[in-house]
Image (cartoon, rainbow, N blue to C red):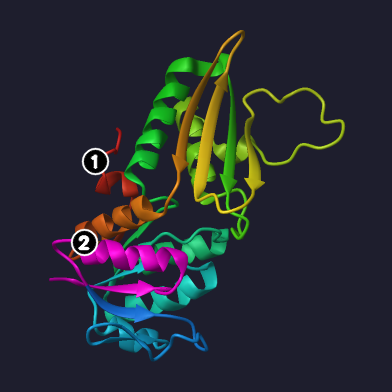
């Protein structure tokens, strides 16, 4: 069976990914990676597997990697994966434009799926939002509210931006021309075709995203609420199974889940 490297194996997502791999019929854990200096480095995590801090050595034991860490750590391991010919499933968010461009360059050497969210239902939500924006047209204002736990570092979330992209795509627009991330003071009237995102951070909320289409006298709300991280992990493992053995390229998550549109 294809062997999986879990990057950030002792983190909250890494732990759930390891559980999902143990339940997957077609994949097995091949290696576990943590940052140098992590207290778990060198300790056993499964039969015959110890936590490593050496990306090259860990990648040599695997055919595909799953990574939910930080942009800098991800790119370090992804570069090594490109050298080793190891496929890469990336759920890390918060990349700069230059970092995203580098991921695109690395995809010329290995197959990569980089997605802000690996939940099947969230990706179906994105599809629904795109269709709603297309059908409702310009008579409805679009606003998004996202809530995550207190430790989340990037804002707005990658998923919120992905959903905002779906609104813009449904309208035939470029998100950058309409995105509003801050409102304070005397802001004046709402710009035509604005797509607003409001960010909340509190407690241990795994993730909640609501998209509102607000018209005159009515509104449509589409919401996804996550109470655990397990569905993200299962989606990433499903993606790793799909990606293993494919040609180099940057594959959209919609293709994995059969949600691509013309």
- Span colored in magenta: 1-28
Residue 235 position within the rendered picture, expressed as x and y whole percent measured from the top left:
31, 52
Name the one closer to the observer, 155 or 87: 155
Q: Decide: few, some or many residues near mark 1? Use Cα within 10 Å; few <14, some 14-19, many ≥20.
A: few
Residue 60: quadrant of the picture: bottom left
Name the one closer to the observer, 238 or 74: 238
- Name the residue located 65 percent from the left edge and 45 percent from the top edge: 200
**Name of the residue lying farthest toward the bottom:** 42
Question: Of circles 2 and 1, which is in front?
Answer: 2
Asked if 35 appears above or below 198 in the picture, the reply is: below
Q: Quadrant of the N terminus?
A: bottom left
Residue 14 position within the rendered picture, expressed as x and y whole percent measured from the top left:
40, 68
Please tell me which of labels 2 and 1 falls first in the chain: 2
Labelled disc at residue 110 = none
Q: Which residue is denoted by mark 2 in the rendering?
A: 23
**226 in magenta:** no
- Name the residue located 29 percent from the left edge and 80 percent from the top edge: 31
Asked if 90 appears above or below 259 in the picture, the reply is: below
Q: Decide: few, some or many residues near mark 2? Use Cα within 10 Å; few <14, some 14-19, many ≥20.
A: few
Name the one closer to the observer, 250 or 240: 240
**Name of the residue lying farthest toward the right:** 186
Q: CA distance from mark 2 to mark 1?
A: 23 Å
Residue 213 position within the rendered picture, expressed as x and y whole percent measured from the top left:
54, 22
Q: Which residue is denoted by mark 1 in the rendering?
A: 258
Residue 111 visible in the displayed image = no
- Name the residue located 47 percent from the left edge and 61 percent from the top edge: 92
């Amino acid at each position: 069976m294809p062997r999986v490297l879990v990057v950030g194996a002792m983190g909250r997502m890494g732990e759930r990914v390891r559980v999902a791999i143990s339940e997957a019929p077609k994949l097995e854990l091949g290696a576990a990676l943590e940052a140098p200096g992590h207290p778990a480095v060198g300790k056993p995590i499964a039969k015959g597997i110890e936590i490593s801090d050496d990306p090259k050595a860990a990648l040599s034991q695997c055919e595909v990697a799953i990574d939910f860490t930080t942009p800098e750590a991800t790119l370090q391991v992804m570069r090594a994966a490109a050298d080793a010919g190891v496929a890469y499933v990336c759920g890390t968010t918060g990349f700069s434009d230059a970092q995203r461009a580098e991921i695109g360059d690395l995809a010329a050497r290995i197959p990569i799926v980089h997605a802000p969210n690996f939940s099947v239902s969230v990706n179906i939500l994105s599809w629904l939002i795109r269709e709603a924006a297309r059908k409702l047209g310009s008579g409805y204002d679009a606003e998004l509210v996202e809530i995550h736990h207190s430790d989340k570092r990037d804002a707005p979330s990658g998923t919120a931006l992905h959903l905002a992209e779906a609104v813009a795509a449904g309208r035939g627009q470029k998100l950058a021309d309409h995105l509003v991330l801050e409102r304070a003071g005397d802001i004046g009237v709402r710009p035509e075709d604005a797509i607003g995102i409001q960010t909340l951070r509190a407690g241990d909320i795994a993730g909640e995203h609501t998209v509102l289409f607000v018209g005159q006298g009515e509104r449509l709300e589409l919401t996804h609420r996550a109470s655990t991280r397990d569905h993200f992990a299962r989606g990433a493992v499903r993606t790793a199974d799909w990606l293993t053995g494919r040609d180099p390229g940057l594959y959209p998550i919609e293709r994995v889940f059969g949600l691509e549109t013309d």
